[in-house]
Amino acid sequence: MPFGFKTCAPNECMVVSGLCHSKPKLVLGGKSFLWPFIQKLQRIKLNVLTCVVTTGHVYTQKGVPVSITATAQVKISNRRQQLHAACQLFLSMSPGQITTVATQTLEGHQRAIMGSMTVEEIYQDRLKFSAAVRGVAEPDLEGMGMEIVSYTIKDVSDDEGYLHAIGEKRTAEVQRDAVIGQAIAQKDAVLEEEQAKMISLAAFYENETAKAEARRNFEVKNAMYKMEIQAKKAEEDLAGKLQAAKTNQGIMHEQMGVLVVERTKDIQVQEQEIVVKERQLDAEIRKEAKATKYQRETLAEADKNAKVTDAHADADAIRAKGEATAFAIAAKAKAEAEAMEKKADAFKQYQGAAMVDMVLKTLPRVAAEIASPLSRVDKLTMVAGENGDVGAARLTNEVLEIMNSIPGTIFNMTGVNLNEAISRASTSVV
């Protein structure tokens, strides 16, 4: 017998027994010294062993016979306690014999698990079946020094057509679910399409609403700007008229001053002419008789005094008349200017009352303009219904109806509600 140091591969275990060992020495992938004649060396393989576990025609929990073919991978455990047990049981056996022992053990436990489960559980939940088999088989295999590396079901079959019937049922259910799912998908597609249309239509209307609102804001602001411009123009017109009145007043004052100066000059000229005439008369009277001199001087003096008195009276009358006329014109211009200023202040302060006053003053002119074509009609024939008015009342009603439609026409053309404006103005006046 060879002796000395012995080695073993990683996939085997050396078992040294004999002298110096109360129980066999196990060497895994290492070396050991062997004494000749007094010690014995044996080897056991640790390779994986494939077991094909076939269990045929076993009645399940509900009495349906099925056959199952499974594949299990087992090996000798490398743990010391299990390895000693395996050495006691399989040390002199070949790998094929060890495989047969493991296969028979797994087949018995597989048969027991098949009888405790239904066909549906075995077929639909194979992991549960595999875990159940491993759960009951592992303790026995560990007692023999072995361990399960893997366990999987390879095939499940039956001779009664039960599994085929389950498949057809499931196929029908799948087809039914497919039809239902297709219908639901079509319904969802239609709903989504309609929702998309509704969203698009809502966005369209929202955009149109925003455009209309922007247009309305533009028109409102434009109307406000126009009102402001018209108000400014009215103020400028009133200011222009007031300034023109003041200018005219100044011009008239200057004209009166010029007239007074001219009239004063005329009086002075007349006085000088009187003096010249007096001197001429005085010279002529001196050439005549002294008897008539006194008479003529007296007459000339009286005439002179009378003319001077008349001239002064005329001058005073003209001056008084001119001053009165100038005062009247200035007072009238001042009154008109003050009236314009008060009217402008009234428009600013009492906008509602001013508007009502303007409307009330304008309505008769509007009615006159509406009725003016009727004044040029030579002959008019009125035809009324059963309860209709005839004669002058009918014409008056026609004119009033046309006047009543004027606020609506103004609102359609400008967007300004004249009735509301007059109502607000009347309320503000009250």
Image: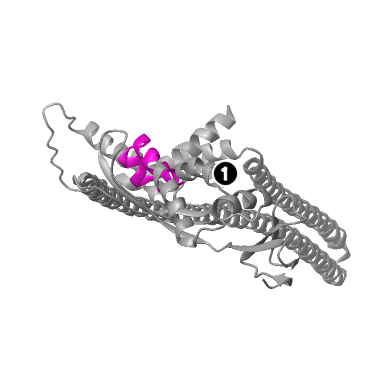
Residue at left 64%, top 56%?
Answer: 78
Q: Is residue 130 left or right of residue 158?
A: right
Placement of 203 over or under 387, stated as above or below: below
Image quadrant occupied by the N terminus = bottom right
Quarter of the image with the C terminus in it: top right
State whether residue 397 is above or below residue 80: above
Q: Is residue 401 visible?
A: yes
Residue at 83 percent across and 55 percent down: it is 305
User: For the view shown, which residue lies furthest in the front direction?
Assistant: 37
Q: Position of residue 422 (x, y in %)?
A: 49, 36
| Tally of marks | 1
Looking at the rendering, the stretch of residues picked out in magenta corresponds to: 109-130
Q: Nearer the viewer, residue 285 or 113?
A: 113
Q: Main secondary structure of the magenta part?
A: helix
Instruction: Identify the residue at image location x=80%, y=62%.
Output: 264
Residue 74: x percent and y percent?
51, 56
Q: In the rendered image, which residue does mark 1 sit on? A: 143
